[in-house]
């Protein structure tokens, strides 16, 4: 199993890029730590109950909770594939735990791809972000609108705005990214494993750049 880490601020397009890459290559698997946590909250598992308050405030959930979830998932994967880790690791402690998990299951870290996006673009993207609560498809009211306003193209469900996409929580999430996740840029750069990609422009262009970075 190979691991590719998608690094970038909230709204940098990690999920959108991962969905595009996975749609074009059956050997890729998209693992979003945010989706795993939202699902745990929805099912009110013990981890979900503990994570809920942190997520509402736009804070990171404790490293051990999410590291355990990702570790369990990685251990359960059989056969050859490449995991696109979206949103994990988010702290240096998580990166160190990931190193151990990778070693423990005989996997290999290919690289960390950083999607570079200016703050003002991030805020605009998050404000317009909509998602399907049923099938998980993602939209943006301007950049990627559904065919019928407010309705999912894929399954017809009514689109929603994520609870933590409100302006106050977004401000906090961006601050948390800067203080706790940005140190990972130097962490992976120092090991020669960082690939920086401009995360602006048309989605197709961004996806092409990421593919080139992974080649
Ligand atoms: P995301 O969907 O990646 O924007 O994540 C949504 C929220 O889930 C974050 O604001 C955090 O509260 C939590 N979260 C997701 N991934 C992690 C992680 N690796 N470590 C800690 N908290 C996380």
Image (cartoon, grey):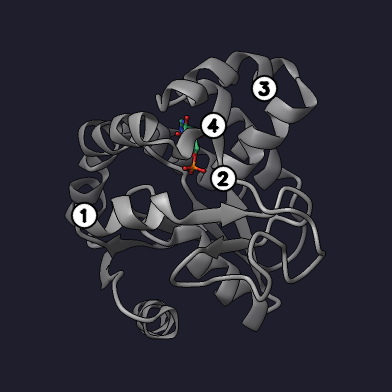
Mark 4 touching mark 3, by CB under 8 A?
A: no
Residue 67 shows which numbered tag?
A: 4
Q: Which class describes the residues within 10 Å of circle 3: few (<14), some (14-19), or many (20+)? A: many
CA distance separating discs 4 and 3? 13 Å
Q: Residue at x 29, y 34 (%)?
A: 171
Nearest to N terminus: mark 2 or mark 3: 3
Which quadrant of the figure has residue 156?
Answer: bottom right
Q: Residue at x 21, y 32 (%)?
A: 179
Instruction: Kindly tell me whether mark 4's CB lies below 8 Å from ligand 1.
Output: yes
Question: Could you tell me residue 107's position as x and y percent?
Answer: 56, 55
CA distance separating discs 1 and 3? 31 Å
Residue at mark 2 = 161
CA distance separating discs 4 and 1? 31 Å
Residue 48 shows which numbered tag?
A: 3
Which quadrant of the figure has residue 118?
Answer: bottom left
Question: Could you tell me residue 180's position as x and y percent?
Answer: 27, 32
CA distance separating discs 2 and 3? 20 Å
Q: Secondary structure at mark 3?
A: helix
| Residue 104 visible from this viewpoint | no
- Tell me the mark number nearer the camera, choosing from 2 and 3: 2
Relative side of 145 to 194, left or right: right
Front in this rendered view, residue 135 or 193 = 135
Nearest to N terminus: mark 4 or mark 1: 4
């Amino acid at each position: 199993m190979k691991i590719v880490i998608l690094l970038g601020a909230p709204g940098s397009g990690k999920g959108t890029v991962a969905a595009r890459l996975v749609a074009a290559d059956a050997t890729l698997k998209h693992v979003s730590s945010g989706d795993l946590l939202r699902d745990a909250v929805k099912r009110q598992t013990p981890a979900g109950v503990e994570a809920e308050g942190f997520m509402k405030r736009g804070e990171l959930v404790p490293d051990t909770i999410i590291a355990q979830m990702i570790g369990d998932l990685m251990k359960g994967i059989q056969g050859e594939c490449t995991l696109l880790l979206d949103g994990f690791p988010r702290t240096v402690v998580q990166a160190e735990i990931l190193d151990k998990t990778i070693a423990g299951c005989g996997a290999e870290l290919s690289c960390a791809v950083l999607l570079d996006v200016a703050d003002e673009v991030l805020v605009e993207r998050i404000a317009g972000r909509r998602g399907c609560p049923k099938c998980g498809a993602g939209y943006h009211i301007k950049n990627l609108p559904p065919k019928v306003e407010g309705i999912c193209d894929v399954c017809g469900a009514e689109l929603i705005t994520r609870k933590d996409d409100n302006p106050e929580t977004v401000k906090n999430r961006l601050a948390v990214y800067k203080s706790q996740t940005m140190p990972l840029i130097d962490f992976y750069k120092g090991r020669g494993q960082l690939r920086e990609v401009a995360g602006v422009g048309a989605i197709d262009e961004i996806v092409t750049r990421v593919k080139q970075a992974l080649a």
